[in-house]
Amino acid sequence: MLPVFLKTLPFFALIGLGWIAARRGFCSPEATAWLTRFVFFLPLSAMLFGFAASLPLSALHEPVFIAAYAGASLAVYALTGAVALLRGCTVAEAAVEAQCGVVGNTGFFGLPMFVTLLGPKAAAPILIMLLIDLVVFSTLITVIMTLWRDRRFDLHIFPSLARGLIGNPMIVSMVAGVLWSASGVPLPAPVKEFVTLLGAAATPCALFAIGASLAGRNAERPAVAAWLSAVKLLLHPLACAVVAFWLLPVDPFAAGLMVATAALPVAGNVYMLAQHYGVAPLRVSTAILFSTAASVITLPLIIARVLMP
C-alpha cells in the first residue's frame, strides 16, 4: 500500500498546490477558468490525439471490455437515480446525482496519472472509458433533462446533441487520432514531437486546475454529497469489479484498470452540466469536493488491490 500511496502522492500534491494557490489569492477564479480552458482545448487534446494516433485500431476494438464498463456503469447510474427518486428528488435531480455516481475525472486526472504510473499500455482502455463517459452519459443526461423540461420528445434534440459532441475537443481529438491511426501513416517526427511537448503540459496544469477549482466550492447537503462520493469511489468500482472479473472474460490488466478508473472522484464537467441546467449545482460541487478529498485514501487502496497486487 505504501509504495502505491507514494507513487500517487505527487499527483494529489499538485491538486493540493492548486488549492493552496487559489485559497491564498495567488490564482484567481478567472485565472483558474482560463487555465482549465487552456488544458481542455490544447494540452489534453494533444495528449489524447497522440495516444489515439499511435494505437492500432485493434486496441480499441474491445467489445467485451466496452460491454463490461458500460453495463456496470449503467447499473450504478440506475441505482443512484432510483435512490434519488425514493428520497423525493425530481427526475432532473435524480439524473444529475446518477451522473455523479458514474462519471469520474478520467480526462484531467485518470489518463495522465495511469499512463505515468503504468505506461502507454494503459492508454487504450482509458480512451474507451473516456469515450463512453463523454458520449453515452453526456447524451443520456441531455435527453433526460430535455424530456423533463419540455415534457415531450422532440427530434430537434438530436442536432443539438450532435453539435455538443462535435464541439467537445476531447472527442474531436480522439476521433482525429483514431482516423490518423486508421490511415496507417505514421505521425511525422516534428508533429509527434509537437504533440508530445504540448501534451506534457496536460498533467501538471490539469491537476493544478482541479485543485484551484476546488478552493471556491461551497458545501450544500453534505449527507447527500457523502452518499454520492461513496457511490463514485466505492460502489462504481465494485460494480466494475463484479462484471469485469467474474461475469465477463475481460483481460485481467484491463479489468484492473477499469476498476481503478471507476474509483476516480466525480468529474468537474458534471458540475458544468448541473450549472447549465440549473439543477443542484451546489450539491454536485460538494460531491466533487468530498470525493476528491476522500480519493487521496481510497484510490491508492484500490490501485494497490487491482493493479499492483
Image (cartoon, rainbow, N blue to C red):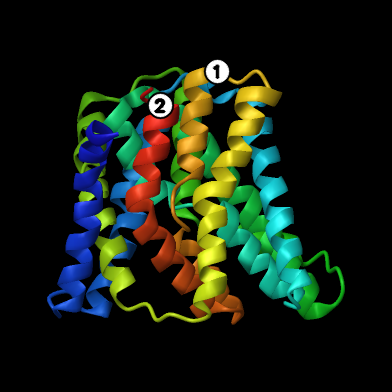
- Dot 2 surroundings within 10 Å: few (below 14), some, or many (20 or more)? some
Of the image marks 1 and 2, the number of the one nearer the N terminus:
1
Q: Which mark is residue 307?
A: 2
- Whether pointer 1 and pointer 2 mark residues with C-beta atoms closer than 8 Å, the reply is no
* Type of the residue with mark 1: Asp
Query: Mark 2: which secondary structure?
Result: loop
In front of the other: 77 or 171: 77
- Residue shown at 54%/39% (left/top)? 129
> Would residue 135 be found to the left or right of residue 297 on screen?
right
Q: Indicate which label's residue lies in the foreground, 1 or 2.
A: 2
Pointer 1 residue: 251
Asked if 207 appears above or below 306 in the picture, the reply is below
Quadrant where the C terminus lies? top left
* Type of the residue with mark 2: Leu
One can see residue 302 in this view: yes
- Dot 1 surroundings within 10 Å: few (below 14), some, or many (20 or more)? few
